[in-house]
Amino acid sequence: MVILLFLSATTLNAQITKQSSEIKKDKSSNIKKDSKQVKTHSIIVKFHCANGKALIERELLKKEGVISASANLETKDVEIKYNPKLVTEEKLIEYIHEIGYLVEGDPADTKLPKKACSH
């Protein structure tokens, strides 16, 4: 019975991984079909560690209109490829705030819905 549960969990995990991979492929193939739907925006984000980099990249991909996100730990630059028909540059900044980070140029009194990092 334990082996059966382990095999079921392993199979389920493999299916989830496959579905996630297929979703990313669908996003990529749609981009190639119509490159006019893709814009790139770079934002300086106030994160400081590898966990923050991973969090930003992972969470931005879950947001509507975001195609890819790449954060540079040294420069703090986050490059976001997005569909301008679905999301604006202002909304991208809101997404970063929702994740829990400030961006360069935010007023000193900017309030975040949550703080991403405790250190």
Image (cartoon, rainbow, N blue to C red):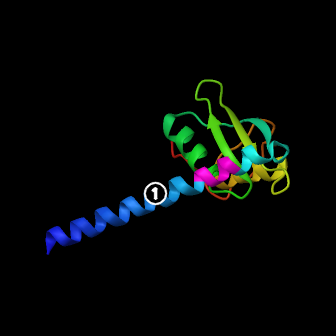
Residue at 19% across / 71% down in the picture? 4
x and y percent of residue 84 in the render? Answer: 84, 50
Q: Is residue 16 visible?
A: yes
Q: What secondary structure predominates along the stretch shown in magenta?
A: helix
Q: Is residue 64 above or below residue 53?
A: below
x and y percent of residue 119 in the render? Answer: 51, 40
Q: Is residue 49 found left or right of 29 in the rendered image?
A: left
The quarter of the rendered structure image containing the N terminus is: bottom left
State the residue in front, 32 or 117: 32
Q: Can residue 65 be found in the magenta stretch?
A: no
- Residue sitting farthest toward the top: 74
Q: Mark 1 Cα within 10 Å, few/some/many (few <14, many 20+)?
A: few
Q: Is residue 68 above or below residue 10?
A: above
Q: Is residue 48 above or below residue 84?
A: above
State the residue in front, 66 or 53: 66
Q: Which of the 4 image quarters holds residue 13?
A: bottom left
Q: Magenta part of the protein: which range?
A: 24-29
Q: Is residue 10 found left or right of 30 in the rendered image?
A: left
Q: Is residue 96 visible?
A: no
Kind of residue at disc 1: Lys
Residue at 67% across / 49% down in the picture? 29
Q: Is residue 15 found left or right of 1 in the rendered image?
A: right
Residue at 72% across / 58% down in the picture? 64
Q: Which of the 4 image quarters holds residue 35?
A: top right
What residue is disc 1 on? 18
x and y percent of residue 114 in the render? Answer: 62, 56
- The total number of labels drawn is 1
- Residue sitting farthest toward the bottom: 1
